[in-house]
Amino acid sequence: MLQIDSVSRAFGGVYAVRDVSLTVAEGETRAVIGPNGAGKSTLFNLISGHLLPDSGTVSYGPEGERRRIDRLTPHARARLGIAIVFQGARLFGGMTVLENVMVGAHARTRHGFLSAALRLPRHREEEARIEADALAALDRVGLRDWAHRTADALPLGQQRSLQVARALCARPRLLLLDEPASGLRAAEREALAQLIESLREEGLTTMLIEHDVAFVSRLADRVSVLDLGRHIAEGTVEEIRRDEAVLSAYLGEGVS
Amino acid sequence: MKPSPRWAAAAAVCAAALLAPLLLSETQLPVYIVLVLAACVVTGLSMLMGYAGQVSLGQAAFFMIGGYTAALIALEELPTWLGLAASPLVAAVLAAVIGVPLLRLRGHQLAFATLAVQLILLNLVGQQEWTGGDIGLQGVPRLAIGGYEFADDVAYAYLALAVLGLTVLITRNIVKSRPGRGLRALATSEVAAESSGVPVAGYKLAVFSLSAGFAGLAGGVYAFYFGYVAPSSFPVLLSFEYVVMVVVGGAGTIYGALVGATAVTLLLQLLNNIGTMEGMPAAAPTVLSYAVYGVLLVLVVLFMPRGLVPTAAAWWERRRSARPRGDDPASDGAERPAPAPASV
């Protein structure tokens, strides 16, 4: 589904991501772990399009229709089915929870200024469909009761859920989750884990940045480890646990 | 179902606006027409500032372009309705062209760049022979649509109201729909809007162009009503006036645009009356009108940073929720004011 080839990106001469290559298969749930500053979020931004690589290529698409996307704008990549949930709460304040989720459908709907201004029947039908989809997405993350409140009024944990609902309303084919569980309480983490599990069962390809080992072990098919911008290891959770490069990256040299 | 206060207010505003041309005196009617035209410009600018988070300090330039377009076409002996139809199109296309480089700028830089555009256009128009130089274009014929000639002030008042109605309708339809959600989203977080599939740059350009189109249309009506256009009719101060109207009324609300335009026009008119009273120095009207923008802007930003309409709406909401109620709490929230606009 996703193929990254020798991608590098530097900021002011310091590599945030250095010569990273990895492939994520369709339907896979891939965890990306690594110490702080390892380049995990930078990698996600290179996939979502908020950063462009200095060198290397990013290709995306199901088998047979894979294409390079590393020069596309983020909204063009969103149209191709890539959705991202940011680490911080990036909500549309002043809009209702429902409207926030409806924005998520932007990536797969078309009607523009002209048909909106004229209120064409097609446009109104599309609006009704988007609203129904958004309510369904809110149901999934348990926010339906909040639909008509403003997004700023949500507690932090629910703000994350709202971002997830927004991403789901786009009906993505590749979902990027940047530390979705951080700052959540136990019950919220459990709900999130169950949601990710159900998405996996539906065959959605997911990439997940996460620190919590239990969370990763439960959800990830495979794990990629970044350290100082380099992709130092990849494998199943068990393989990664025994990997010497990973142990030394986390615990320092000489431990094994 | 009982009519909601929102509908009652809308009906009252419409009724008052439609009755006004019949009730106002000969000297008041021109002020009313200019007010309604300003409301058209301000509605577009309010969408630009409130929803797209962009500030234009040169909106009068598009008003001017519309006016000159209408005047030039009418003076070429072409049908006058063609002039009116072309005025929003020319302004919108011009905005789309200059918007490509301009909208790469943000905040203050964009505001100054739009101001510069107006100064450049004023200079150009003032020096070209075919635009009549500083004297401008005189003797623009009266507007005629399908054999009906708009001859007197009352006819132009209703024409201006029709244009305002169209502007408000288009704005409302856009704001409440998919592109409107995209605009409101990008005003709070461009990054998140982009990754939800909103083409941020394209949307900004579209709303910039649309607001210029509204201003151009109002300018077209202006040219036919006054019968002449000159650079001095479209000073930079006029652009500031529009921004003040948006801020006073509350950016990103349609009612705010209408209230802002009305409040500022009435206040200016009042000050003008005071300034031209016997015994006042000759410069008094000008000084007073300049001063009022400054004072008004400072007062509003200090005490009602969201503007009159959102502040009043919030007050009403608080008052309503303070007392026990039986009506449904979900009815509101469908149309919330957008976040505070970027400051100038």
Image: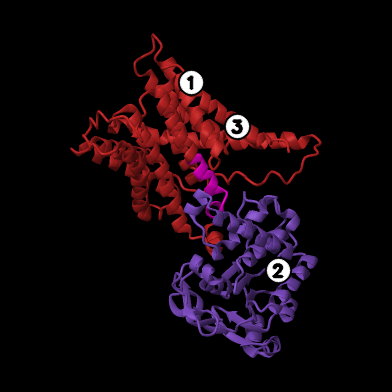
Secondary-structure class at tag 3: helix
Q: Circles 2 and 3: CB distance less than 8 Å?
A: no
Q: Which chain is red?
A: B
Identity, as a three-letter code, of the amino acid under mark 1: Leu
Q: Residue at x 63, y 54 (%)?
A: A99
Image disc number at residue B22: 1
Secondary-structure class at tag 2: loop
Secondary-structure class at tag 1: helix
Relative horizontal placement of residue B37, taking residue B228 as reference (left or right)? right
Residue B186 located within the stretch drawn in magenta: yes
Question: Residue B41's image quarter?
Answer: top left
Q: Which chain is purple?
A: A
Q: Main secondary structure of the magenta part?
A: helix
Against A41, residue A66 (above or below) is below
Q: Is any part of residue B235 visible from this angle? A: no
Image disc number at residue A119: none
- Between marks 2 and 3, how big is the CA–CA gap? 49 Å
Chain letter of the residue carrying label 1: B
- Between marks 1 and 2, how big is the CA–CA gap? 64 Å
Q: Residue at x 70, y 54 (%)?
A: A147
Chain letter of the residue carrying label 3: B
Identity, as a three-letter code, of the amino acid under mark 2: Ala
Magenta residue span: B167-188
Q: Residue furthest front?
A: B147
- Between marks 1 and 3, how big is the CA–CA gap? 18 Å
Pointer 2: what residue? A181
Tag 3 or tag 1, which sits nearer the N-term? 3
Residue A145 located within the stretch drawn in magenta: no
Where residue A107 appears, as percent x and y from the top left, is: 55, 65
Residue B214 vs residue B99, the one in the foreground? B214
Against B43, residue B264 (above or below) is above
